[in-house]
Amino acid sequence: MGDFGFYGHRFAIKVSVAELVPSAHVGWNNVSSTRGSFEGTTIAFDLKSDENDTTLLFAHRAFKNADDEYASATTRWGYYLLSSRKGYAESRRY
């Protein structure tokens, strides 16, 4: 069980690991969230590598309705993933 949050944890999601393939895949079941909007949904991250590049594949699935919460999730994940990955990469020393 773990959690992550946005906006200083004003919005937080609790997840449990449903699937794990080290260095390739992690799947989470969303157990609860501060607004209840992501409960019952799933999140998956997959890494695909070739000689020179690694691609991150992301999916957030099992929304009950294509409503405002769904629309918010589909547009905001791209922003969060790009900005956090960029910040992390720029802070690392190679």
Image (cartoon, rainbow, N blue to C red):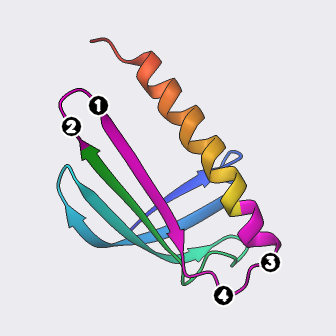
Q: Report which residue position mark 2 lands on.
A: 50
Q: Position of residue 12 (x, y in %)?
A: 62, 61
Work out whether 2 lies above or below 36. above
**Residue closest to the far front:** 51
Labels 4, 2: front one = 2
Work out whether 62 lies above or below 24. below
Which residue is rendered at x = 60% and y = 53% of the image? 5
Q: Position of residue 23 (x, y in %)?
A: 19, 49
For numbered disc 3, what is the local secondary structure?
A: loop
* Label 4 Cα crowd, 10 Å radius (few <14 / some 14-19 / many 20+): few
Q: Report which residue position mark 1 lands on.
A: 53
Which residue is rendered at x = 69% and y = 76% of the image? 37
Quarter the N terminus occupies: bottom left
For numbered disc 1, what is the local secondary structure?
A: loop
Which residue is rendered at x = 23% and y = 26% of the image? 52
In the drawing, does residue 14 fall left or right of residue 54? right
* Label 2 Cα crowd, 10 Å radius (few <14 / some 14-19 / many 20+): few
Q: Report which residue position mark 4 lands on.
A: 64
Q: Amino acid at mark 3?
A: Asp
Query: Do residues under tags 2 and 1 come within 8 Å of each other at their CB atoms?
Result: yes
- Residue sitting nearer the eye, 14 or 90: 90
**CA separation, marks 4 and 2?**
36 Å
Q: Which comes before the other along the chain, label 3 or label 1?
A: 1
